[in-house]
Image (cartoon, rainbow, N blue to C red):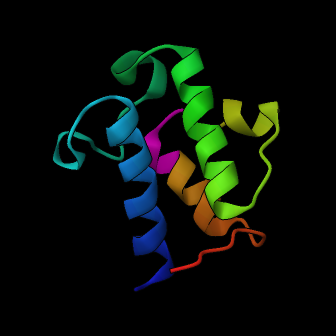
C-alpha cells in the first residue's frame, strides 16, 4: 500500500472512531474546530497520530493544521513518520 494511502486511512480511522462517524462522512477539508468539535478532541487525535506514527508534534505544529487533510500532509511529509503495515 502506498505511504500516503496508508497514512490517510489510519488518520481517517482515528477521526471516525473518535467522533463516532463513518469514514465516508469525513472529508479532508473538514476543519477541527468548526466541523468536528472541541480542542480536547483534536488533541486526542493528534496524540493518537504521534503514537501510531512515532512522531512528535509541537503546539506550534498543531496550530498550523486546521483540517484533516493538513494533518495527513504533515504526517506524510514528516521524514520521521514510521508506518508498520
Residue drawn 82% across the image and 38% down it:
58
* Residue 9 visible to the viewer: yes
Residue drawn 55% across the image and 48% down it:
71
Q: Nearer the viewer, residue 32 or 49?
A: 49
Q: Looking at the rendering, in which quadrant would you find the N terminus?
A: bottom left
* Residue 44 point in image, percent of width and height: 59, 31
* Residue 22 point in image, percent of width and height: 20, 42
User: Residue reaching furthest bottom?
Assistant: 1
Instruction: Count the marks.
Output: 0
Magenta span = 66-70
Q: Nearer the viewer, residue 64 or 78?
A: 78
Residue drawn 24% across the image and 48% down it:
23
Question: What secondary structure prevails in the magenta region?
Answer: helix
Residue drawn 37% across the image and 50% down it:
12
Going by the image, does 30 lie left or right of 10? Answer: left
Going by the image, does 31 lie left or right of 58? Answer: left
* Residue 65 visible to the viewer: no
Q: Is residue 69 magenta?
A: yes
Residue 27: name its quadrant. top left
Residue 48: name its quadrant. top right
Q: Is residue 21 magenta?
A: no
Going by the image, does 40 lie left or right of 38? Answer: right
Q: Nearer the viewer, residue 34 or 22?
A: 22
* Residue 38 point in image, percent of width and height: 49, 13
Going by the image, does 31 lie left or right of 71? Answer: left
* Residue 2 point in image, percent of width and height: 44, 84
Amino acid at each position: 500500500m502506498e505511504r500516503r494511502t496508508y497514512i490517510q486511512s489510519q488518520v481517517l480511522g482515528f477521526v471516525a472512531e473518535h467522533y463516532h462517524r463513518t469514514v465516508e462522512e469525513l472529508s479532508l477539508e473538514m476543519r477541527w474546530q468548526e466541523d468536528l468539535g472541541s480542542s480536547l478532541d483534536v488533541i486526542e487525535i493528534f496524540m493518537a497520530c504521534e503514537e501510531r506514527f512515532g512522531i512528535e508534534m509541537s503546539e506550534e505544529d498543531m496550530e498550523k493544521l486546521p483540517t484533516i487533510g493538513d494533518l495527513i500532509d504533515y504526517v506524510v511529509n514528516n521524514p520521521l513518520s514510521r508506518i508498520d503495515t
